[in-house]
């Protein structure tokens, strides 16, 4: 990637993101024309006084309360998962690391399962019991994994990964056991495949601060992460406080992932593959890798979700689409760039 | 969770869902006798198309489907029932019968120990288990009705198998009469768009038992356009279809009111939203293909056309 056009490139990328959000909002099952969609958006966003004649109130609700916030949410969730994937892959020096590798997804799923099975009904800031329990489960499981693998003030990476896998398996088994006894198996299963269906502004408001602050924190460590690629010992010799860096990244990514997972369910693939795809184009430097992963992850998620809600006359869990379309695309890129490696 | 074999779990989930509905036609029993007494050995065909030979009048019965448990009690043969599933919650007397299985399927060992002559099941009974039970001489009859006609046929068939054909015919006759009464009552009404919410916008699509009930009442099922029997609709589709009646079998009214966009839907603006929560009697009979199905039909009619029932 050339250095000279950084600012212009950033501008272009922002415009691209905006265009994708708007464009995806115009697509959907309900028969609402392009012009009508734009009119509704202009009227709502810029509070412009536009002639709204011939536009049904249901069309307005579909655009403003359903499609538009859904697209924005997909963007921020996709971006969040992608940068969490980048962080884990770098600090663990493991190409197979993804945001769920430390058992966050299983913890979230356990929380959600408890909410579904116990039929809990309460709301905090427009978020339902399932989301709130999933968030508690996700952060709780990371706290557990972190403390199991902590030796004094240090957290050895291998112990962290292994305890993450062990706790993840344990929690998955607990979920499966609950499914055996529960009536709501299909709801639990659909939750674990992820969906943006019926998610709106309150979910976006929940995710947005985590996504933005998370991005800022992770981006602020970009130099240290570059050095981490040389290996933890070398990085320590070069003056990086590796334990502090790991702690910072772990806590941040855990909260960001937990926020995303708790409102959408478990959406796989994005956090694992998007960093690799971006790395093919930008190389390993985090100053490019982090922002471009965010943008690519976000756009990819919007496209997948647009397919998920408009491909056939019913909702498809978006986690299926991400893997179904992303997998072959990634394989194609790998084939194209056989010489480079990851 | 990624480690779970999702396709397998998904399969199980749908197998479970299918137990509410149907995929094959009931063909009824062969006519083997003119009188009301059944003549054994008796050959019948169940909803899976399997021919089952009943050697003599069954004395011990196991039912692992809530709907057939209801049929057996309705026929007055509750005392012959020696085993039931965890979900057979009606009538009250059923609670005294031993439990021989839950959602993960019937427990073969418990069933064999009871030595029943015949076992009634819904479509969800696993193939291997069925083979094992049949290998031990237990006659397995699987019911999978796809509409009310199918349920009525199953009641008659059960009566024939258990040698109470006359009782069964009487029951079916009175159910038919009640059914006709309800259907003719609503027949002049304008078709209303109805959405059934089974949670997370999963609904009952075409081919499902609930869909057949809605079409019997002349209602237009919003989910009939979805793929398969249990489509998950997008919220956008629901708002766009603008159902006039919204029936929730799972989400509470608070949950629905929190859902953005639904307030624009006709049903919400005209107070035509009905929640039939899990755990109450009505929740069972609006989707269970048993003898209370006509009560279910009536409840649907009342919900969809309230003005007729004032």
Image (spheres, rainbow, N blue to C red):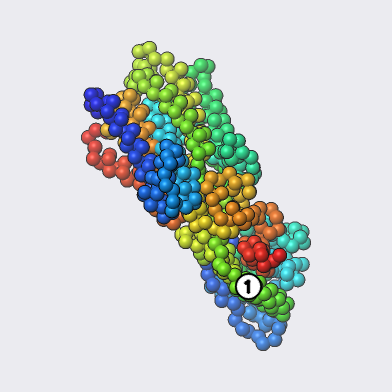
Residue B92 pos. (x, y %): 76, 60
Label 1 crowd (10 A; few <14 / some 14-19 / many >=20): some
Report the residue at 53% width, 16% height from top: A152
Count of numbered badges drawn on the protein = 1
User: Could you tell whether B211 is left or right of A281 in the image?
Assistant: right
Residue B22 pos. (x, y %): 55, 66
Report the residue at 53% width, 65% height from top: B220
Q: What chain is tagged by disc 1?
A: B
Residue B304 pos. (x, y %): 62, 63
Locate the C terminus of chain B and report the quarter of the image it occupies.
Answer: bottom right
User: Could you tell whether B17 is left or right of A239 in the image?
Assistant: right
The answer to whether any part of residue A219 appears in the image is yes
Which of the two residues, B125 or A40, is positioned nearer the viewer here? A40
Residue A166 pos. (x, y %): 51, 34
The answer to whether any part of residue A305 appears in the image is no
Q: Which residue is mark 1?
A: B183
Report the residue at 68% width, 56% height from top: B86
Which of the two residues, B41 or A51, is positioned nearer the viewer here? A51
Which of the two residues, A270 or B49, is positioned nearer the viewer here? A270
């Amino acid at each position: 990637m050339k250095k000279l056009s950084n600012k212009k490139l950033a501008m272009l990328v922002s415009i691209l993101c905006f265009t994708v959000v708007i464009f995806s909002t115009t697509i959907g099952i309900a028969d609402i024309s392009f012009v009508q969609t734009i009119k509704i958006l202009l009227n709502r966003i810029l509070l412009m006084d536009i002639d709204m004649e011939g536009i049904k109130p249901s069309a307005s609700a579909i655009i403003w309360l359903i499609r538009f916030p859904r697209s924005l949410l997909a963007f921020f969730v996709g971006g969040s998962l992608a940068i969490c994937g980048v962080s884990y892959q770098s600090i663990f020096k493991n190409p197979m690391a993804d945001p769920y590798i430390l058992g966050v997804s299983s913890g979230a799923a356990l929380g959600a399962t408890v909410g579904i099975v116990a039929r809990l009904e309460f709301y905090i800031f427009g978020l339902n019991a399932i989301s709130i329990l999933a968030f508690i489960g996700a952060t709780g499981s990371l706290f557990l994994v972190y403390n199991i693998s902590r030796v004094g003030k240090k957290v050895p990476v291998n112990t962290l990964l292994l305890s993450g896998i062990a706790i993840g398996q344990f929690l998955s088994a607990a979920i499966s056991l609950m499914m055996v006894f529960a009536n709501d198996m299909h709801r639990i299963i659909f939750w674990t495949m992820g969906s943006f269906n019926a998610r709106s502004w309150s979910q976006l408001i929940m995710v947005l601060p985590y996504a933005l602050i998370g991005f800022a924190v992770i981006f602020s460590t970009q130099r240290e992460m570059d050095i981490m690629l040389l290996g933890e010992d070398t990085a320590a010799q070069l003056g990086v406080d590796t334990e502090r860096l790991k702690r910072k990244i772990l806590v941040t990514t855990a909260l960001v992932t937990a926020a995303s997972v708790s409102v959408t369910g478990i959406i796989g693939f994005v956090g694992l593959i998007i960093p690799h795809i971006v790395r093919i184009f930008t190389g390993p430097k985090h100053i490019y890798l982090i922002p471009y992963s965010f943008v690519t992850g976000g756009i990819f998620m919007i496209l997948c979700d647009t397919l998920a809600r408009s491909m056939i006359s019913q909702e498809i869990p978006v986690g299926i689409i991400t893997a179904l379309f992303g997998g072959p695309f990634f394989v194609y890129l790998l084939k194209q760039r056989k010489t480079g490696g990851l | 969770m990624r480690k779970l074999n999702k396709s397998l779990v998904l399969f199980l989930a749908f197998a479970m869902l299918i137990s509410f509905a149907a995929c094959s036609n009931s063909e009824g029993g062969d006519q083997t006798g003119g009188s009301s007494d059944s003549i054994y050995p008796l050959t019948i065909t169940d909803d899976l198309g399997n021919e089952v030979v009943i050697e003599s009048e069954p004395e011990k019965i196991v039912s692992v489907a809530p709907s057939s448990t209801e049929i057996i009690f309705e026929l007055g043969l509750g005392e012959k029932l020696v085993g039931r599933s965890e979900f057979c919650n009606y009538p009250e007397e059923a609670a005294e019968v031993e439990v021989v299985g839950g959602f993960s399927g019937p427990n073969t060992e418990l069933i064999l120990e009871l030595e029943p002559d015949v076992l009634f099941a819904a479509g969800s009974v696993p193939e291997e288990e069925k083979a094992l039970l049949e290998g031990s001489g237990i006659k397995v009859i699987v019911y999978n009705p796809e509409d009310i006609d199918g349920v009525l046929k199953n009641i008659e068939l059960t009566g024939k198998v258990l040698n109470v054909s006359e009782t069964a015919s009487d029951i079916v006759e009175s159910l038919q009469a009640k059914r006709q009464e309800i259907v003719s009552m609503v027949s002049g009404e304008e078709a209303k768009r109805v959405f059934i919410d089974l949670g997370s916008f999963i609904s009952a699509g075409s081919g499902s038992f609930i869909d057949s009930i809605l079409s019997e009442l002349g209602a237009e099922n919003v989910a009939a356009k979805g793929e398969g029997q249990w489509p998950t609709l997008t919220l956008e589709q629901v708002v766009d279809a603008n159902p006039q009646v919204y029936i929730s079998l799972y989400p509470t009214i608070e949950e629905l009111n929190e859902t953005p966009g639904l307030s624009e839907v006709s049903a919400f603006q005209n107070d035509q939203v009905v929640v039939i929560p899990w755990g109450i009697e009505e929740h069972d009979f609006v989707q269970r293909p048993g003898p209370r199905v006509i009560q279910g039909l009536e409840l649907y009619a009342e919900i969809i056309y309230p003005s007729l029932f004032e």
